[in-house]
Amino acid sequence: MPYKINEHIADIRIAARGRNLEQLFTDAFLGMMYILKPVQKFLPEKIEREISLEAIDTTALLVDFLNETLSLANANKEFYTHVIFYKIQPTSLRAKLFGVSTESFHRDIKDVTYHEAEVKQTEDGAWETVIVFPR
């Protein structure tokens, strides 16, 4: 599993790590989708959504990316199975989300917070962060 989930009474934390920014963002995205889990079986409609974001720094970009994905999933009742990044830089990205329609989710995630979030590069060149999802 590319991410580690730590549950608490008030929130859920994901510790994500990747060899590059694309892998870090992908792993954080997959961790969030794992937490959401659709309750109903997938409906046959296949979904593709493009997103483009800019932020002041890499931490803000990751939090904004996850919030945008979460917002789209909740608003459109969609579960995203994977993401392809066409461009990912420290302060901007362009990506496509792929998924399916769903009726509801197993868990409710209110939003993605900046609390404890800090995208940083380690001495070995990998990227890591912790993301907090309030329940």
Image (spheres, rainbow, N blue to C red):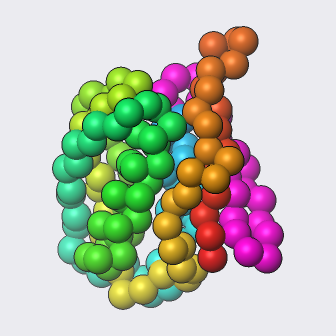
Asked if the stretch drawn in magenta spans residue 121, the answer is no
Residue drawn at point x = 42 percent, y = 86 percent: 104
Task: Find out whether residue 12 is within the magenta segment.
Answer: yes
Q: Is residue 42 above or below residue 47?
A: below
Q: Quadrant of residue 52?
A: top left
Per the rendered image, the range of residues in magenta is: 1-23
Compare residues 125 and 43 and report the one nearer the observer.
125
Query: At 69% from the left edge and 65% from the top edge, which residue is drawn?
Result: 12
Position of residue 10 measured from the top left corner of the image (x, y, whole percent): 73, 75
In the displayed structure, 109 sits above or below 34; it is: below
> Residue 76, position in %: x, y?
26, 76
Q: Is residue 127 left or right of residue 92?
A: right
Location of the C terminus (image quadrant): bottom right
Task: Return the x and y of residue 110 as percentages of the image width and height.
Answer: 51, 74
Whether residue 85 is visible to the viewer of this picture, yes or no, is no
Q: Nearest the camera: 22 or 61? A: 61
**Residue drawn at the location 35% of the way across and 67% of the way down:** 71
